Amino acid sequence: MHAALPTPHPAHVPERSCVACRRKRPQAEFLRVTRVGGRWDLRAGHRVGRGAYVCADTPECWQEKRLRRAFRAQAAEIAAQLQTQHAAPQQQSSAPSARVSPEVSHV
Ligand SMILES: [Zn+2]
């Protein structure tokens, strides 16, 4: 038998699994949701609390019903945060009040 090097610590690439789809991926491909002070927070620091991970590029994983198992009562809130943070990344340059029609003339 020629034993290949046993790797007791396969942890060099930190892999996480998505709380919604359970897929395993490198940590960099996830959004981290942190539990701080008894609440889940998408924007908390990285070193505090414990984290849960959701695929950063998969909107299906941001649905409330898929998050409920992990976030329970806060699933809707986290789902909303994920969607507002990551939906439509292309529109962030100018005109915060974007509904001004040029046809409207103030006379
Ligand atoms: Zn996922």
Image (tube, helix red, strand yellow):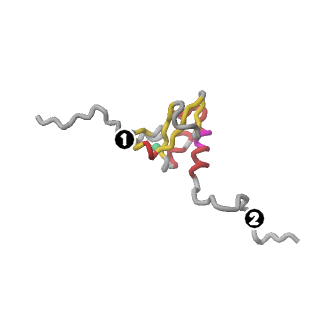
Quarter of the picture holding the N terminus = top left
Give how far apart the Cα atoms at labels 1 and 2 are.
Answer: 48 Å
Q: Which residue is mark 2?
A: 100
Q: Tag 2: residue type?
A: Val
Residue 97 lies, in percent from the top left, at 73, 59
In the rendered structure, which disc, 1 or 2, sits on the residue that comes first in sequence? 1
Residue at screen point 76% across, 70% down = 102
- Circle 1 sits in a helix, a strand or a loop, which is it? loop
Q: Which one is in front in this view, the residue at disc 1 or the one at disc 2?
A: 1
- Point out which mark residue 93 bears: none
Q: Is residue 106 magenta?
A: no
Measuring from the top left, give residue 33's x and y in whole percent. Answer: 54, 38
> Residue 37 at what x, y percent from top left?
60, 28
| Residue that label 1 marks | 13
Q: Using a 10 Å C-alpha cutoff, classify the residue at mark 2 as few (fewer than 14 neighbours), some (14 to 19) or many (20 or more).
A: few
**Amino acid under disc 1:** Val
- Tell me what residue is drawn at x 42 percent, y 38 percent: 16
Residue furthest right in the image = 107
What is the magenta range? 76-80
